[in-house]
């Protein structure tokens, strides 16, 4: 049986990925590369929707690639590349923009949230067309699965709609992909506001665990995490969102079931539990942070890896673009 194809992407908008990225998406990326034909992309063009200093964007793109390798993405198994190295992404995005309704794009909740926060004058057109570029990122590689967190579900739905519409109008060019979302890990929450998604755009970083944080900073963030009324360590998302979030994190990284962690901490206090979660997190993240720094000390090697990835990605992407152009009647 031929291998299934997987594609996903991550923005290089910050100095470090966070625990939400890691548990919601990146851990899956690593697992999926073993039995599938995987394409993973640092989406630098998407990062342009946020105003960033050029030097910083350059640095963060390399740092993103380094973190992905440190997490376990193996460039010999997966095609690891940078979005702007494959011009077909922009080329196909334009075609998709012409078959996407204005209303349809206006309904994207991430766009609505971000544009409401920034106001019309500070919202760029790129932010509006962003999900259409994402559809091109995905469909160029004809993937079966797109491993993402819950916040990307709507974008993958739009991608499916665009692919179906294109195929119906112009003949079948695109495979219809499925979002692969692990329900229990799809929304890791902020440690200070456990009903909100852990996110880099949070107003404070106190509740955001960064992969490259020092162990001291991570411990401090867990120790001061917001917990709930009562004293019991029990999973209950409605009544105990803080403890439930910590249980989810512990379980995902220790491999223990939620139930067994609950029993382990029966009769113990929140303080002990928070320190134990921090310990598990630090044991997982510290080696990743170290490996990232090592990889960043040989940038020439990193650039070489990304060049090889770009070559492979360009081959697949340009084939699909050719079929799409031909289907719509471009000579
Ligand atoms: P981005 O860069 O914001 O996030 C990368 C991945 O992390 C997941 N994620 C989370 N999962 C669980 N809990 C959280 N708190 C959490 N925060 C983030 C995201 O769902 C995502 O899977 N638009 C995309 C990037 C993108 C892309 C693509 C993804 C561009 N093209 C093509 C897949 C396929 C984004 O902004 O993800």
Image (tube, rainbow, N blue to C red):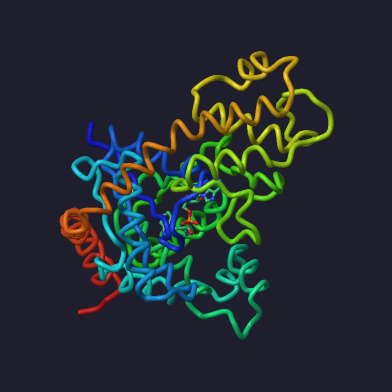
Residue 152 in the image: state x and y as whole percent: 52, 53
Picture quarter with the N terminus: top left
Rendered position, 169 above or below 177 = below
In the image shown, does 84 or 242 lie closer to the viewer?
A: 242
Question: Is 301 on the left-hand or right-hand side of 91?
Answer: left
Front residue (pair 115, 170) = 115
- Residue displayed at 31% across by 63% down: 83
Residue lying furthest front in this view? Answer: 216
Q: Residue at x 46, y 46 (%)?
A: 211
User: What percent of the width, then of the height, locates residue 120?
Assistant: 63, 82
Of residue 286 and residue 52, the one placed in the foreground of this image is 286
In-front residue for pair 237/260: 260
Q: Is residue 56 above or below residue 300?
A: below
Q: How many marks?
A: 0
Asked which quadrant contains residue 141, the reply is bottom left
Task: Judge whether residue 179 can be spotted in this image.
Answer: no
Q: Left or right of 110: which side holds 98?
A: left
Left or right, residue 211 beside residue 44: right
Q: For the C terminus, which image quadrant?
A: bottom left
State whether residue 147 appears in this view: yes
Residue 4 at x, y = what percent?
A: 30, 39
**Residue farthest along the right direction in this orientation:** 230
Q: Is residue 136 left or right of residue 105?
A: left
Query: Residue 191: horizontal and vertical position, in percent?
Result: 65, 44
Image: 279 above or below 259: below
């Amino acid at each position: 049986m031929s291998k299934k194809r997987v594609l996903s992407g991550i923005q290089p908008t910050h100095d470090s990925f966070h625990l939400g990225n890691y548990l919601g998406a990146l851990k899956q990326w690593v697992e999926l590369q073993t039995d599938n034909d995987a394409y993973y992309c640092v989406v630098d063009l998407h990062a342009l929707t946020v105003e960033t200093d050029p030097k910083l964007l350059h640095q963060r793109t390399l740092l993103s690639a380094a973190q992905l390798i440190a997490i376990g993405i193996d460039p010999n198994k997966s095609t690891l590349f940078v979005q702007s190295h494959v011009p077909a992404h922009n080329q196909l995005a334009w075609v998709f923009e012409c078959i996407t309704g204005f209303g349809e794009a206006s309904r994207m909740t991430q766009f609505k949230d971000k544009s409401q926060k920034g106001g019309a004058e500070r919202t760029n057109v790129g932010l509006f067309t962003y999900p259409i570029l994402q559809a091109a990122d995905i469909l160029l590689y004809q993937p079966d699965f797109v491993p993402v967190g819950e916040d990307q579900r709507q974008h993958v739905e739009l991608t499916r709609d665009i692919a179906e519409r294109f195929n119906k109008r112009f003949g079948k060019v695109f495979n219809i992909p499925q979002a692969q979302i692990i329900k229990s890990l799809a929304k890791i929450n902020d440690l200070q506001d456990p009903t909100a998604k852990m996110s880099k755009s949070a107003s404070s970083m106190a509740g955001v665990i960064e992969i490259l944080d020092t162990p001291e900073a991570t411990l401090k963030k867990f120790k001061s995490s917001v917990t709930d009324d009562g004293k019991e360590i029990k999973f209950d998302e409605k009544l105990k969102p803080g403890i439930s979030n910590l249980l989810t994190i512990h379980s995902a990284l220790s491999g223990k079931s939620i139930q067994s962690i609950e029993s382990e901490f029966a009769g113990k206090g929140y303080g002990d539990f928070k320190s134990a979660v921090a310990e598990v997190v630090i044991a997982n993240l510290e080696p990743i942070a170290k490996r990232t720094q090592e990889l960043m000390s040989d940038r020439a090697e990193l650039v070489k890896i990304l060049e090889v990835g770009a070559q492979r990605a360009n081959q697949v992407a340009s084939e699909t673009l050719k079929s799409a152009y031909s289907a719509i009647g471009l000579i």
